[in-house]
Image: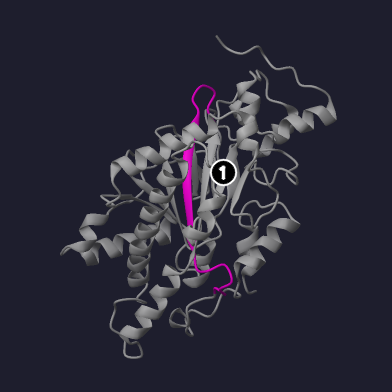
Amino acid sequence: MSPPAMAMPNDDAAETEFQKGVKHLSENGVSKLPNKYILPVSDRPNVDKEQPDVAKSNLKLPIIDFAELQGPNRSQVLSSISSACEEFGFFQVVNHGIPIEVIRSMIDVSTRFFGLPYEERAKYMSSDMASPVRYGTSLNQIKDAVLCWRDFLKLVCHPLSDVLPHWPSSPTDFRELVATYAKETRCLFLRIMEAILESLGLWGATQGDKTPEDDEILIKQFHDGSQLMVVNCFPPCPEPDLTLGMPPHSDYGFLTLLLQDEVEGLQIQYKGKWITVEPMTNSFVVNVGDHLEIFSNGRYKSVLHRVFVNPAKPRLSVASLHSLPFNFMVGPSPKLIDEANPRRYKDTDFAAFLEYISSCELKKKNFLESRKLN
């Protein structure tokens, strides 16, 4: 039996309800989308309507068979990675080596966390961007003029021994299962990053001014790098055409490894149109972040993406965002700058990103645009 439809109280009381998140609204049987979530007409997803900026067909991203990287076809796979990063800014990885039970356990324990009573989830609510664990709603629930239909749990994942005691202790197997998943995705990120560096001619390639020690220094910086996991919960939405789960944005780091369930929701902007990415079982969607676009001096593209929501099905995704250490400056690689390709970006670090998002709404690629040299 469904819960009785939730009536929206007035202003202050309604604002308090909204701050509790969309899972709370959904559990209380909200049957009409509150005004606080309704986007201006120009920003609405229009997924099922004829719109010039929404593609009619879904997109199958380039598929990278990771097992092939270890064999005789390595050079062809590297070329496919390079093409995908230049054209789409996204690709899908299969045969990645992460056991299926680790992936299933991550989806399962995340679903159980969001199924906990609100009071249990609320213990981890924080407005502190630097907190090792943060539960919240929308993008920036204090500043967002229009809220997104999304709740999230953010977990700093490195170094694990420092952050693990701060993570949720309920469900009781949460820390163990999520730590295992975090370690596996970190290892996969490092292997993908080696391939990306090689595809740019910066790692494992022979260059006159480059030594094996250069490779070791570069890859060690990523071994010591940051990892932030974001578990996203998108409950069924009563009027999905009026809102979004996440607005158009790009990711700040080097690479994001995204695990999706089987429910569609992710769209990327390709040739001026929003195209839905088909979920693929036991695969990861990998996307170029702002830092990699900067590091590659614009060769690899950090692409706008967004999430639409569903009237009937809940959706869950797990994004693992990887970059260099938080205090590390990221700039274009000197080896990718020459007369034909002048430097296109300023140096940046995570502190600059935090300062930017705390001062304005994070949407589109505004942060990356702010890093460009005129």
Label 1, on which residue? 153
Number of numbered discs present? 1
Identify the residue shown where x is 55% and y is 9%: 1
- Residue 282 seen by the camera: no
Q: Amino acid at mark 1?
A: Leu
| Residue 13: quarter of image | top right
Depth order, front residue of 9/373: 9
Q: Please determine whether, in this image, residue 109 is positioned above or below residue 372.
A: above
Question: Residue 344 location, x and y as percent?
Answer: 56, 74
- Part of the protein shown in magenta: 309-330
Identify the residue shown where x is 49% and y is 36%: 171
Question: Residue 292 location, x and y as percent?
Answer: 48, 66
Asked if the stretch drawn in magenta spans residue 37, the answer is no
Depth order, front residue of 306/191: 191
Would residue 199 appear left or right of 24 to someone viewing this image?
left
- Residue 235 seen by the camera: yes
Depth order, front residue of 46/245: 245
State which quarter of the image contains the C terminus. Answer: bottom right
Q: Secondary structure at mark 1?
A: strand
Would residue 359 appear left or right of 184 to someone viewing this image?
right
- The color scheme shown is one colour
| Residue 210: quarter of image | bottom left
Asked if the stretch drawn in magenta spans residue 315, the answer is yes
Question: Residue 199 location, x and y as percent?
Answer: 33, 69
Q: Please determine whether, in this image, residue 165 is positioned above or below residue 214.
A: above
Identify the residue shown where x is 48% and y is 59%: 161
Residue at far bottom of view: 209
Residue at far left of view: 72
Question: Residue 101 location, x and y as percent?
Answer: 31, 40
Residue density around tag 1, few if under 14, some if 14–19, many if 20 or more, within 10 Å: many
Identify the residue shown where x is 51% and y is 53%: 164
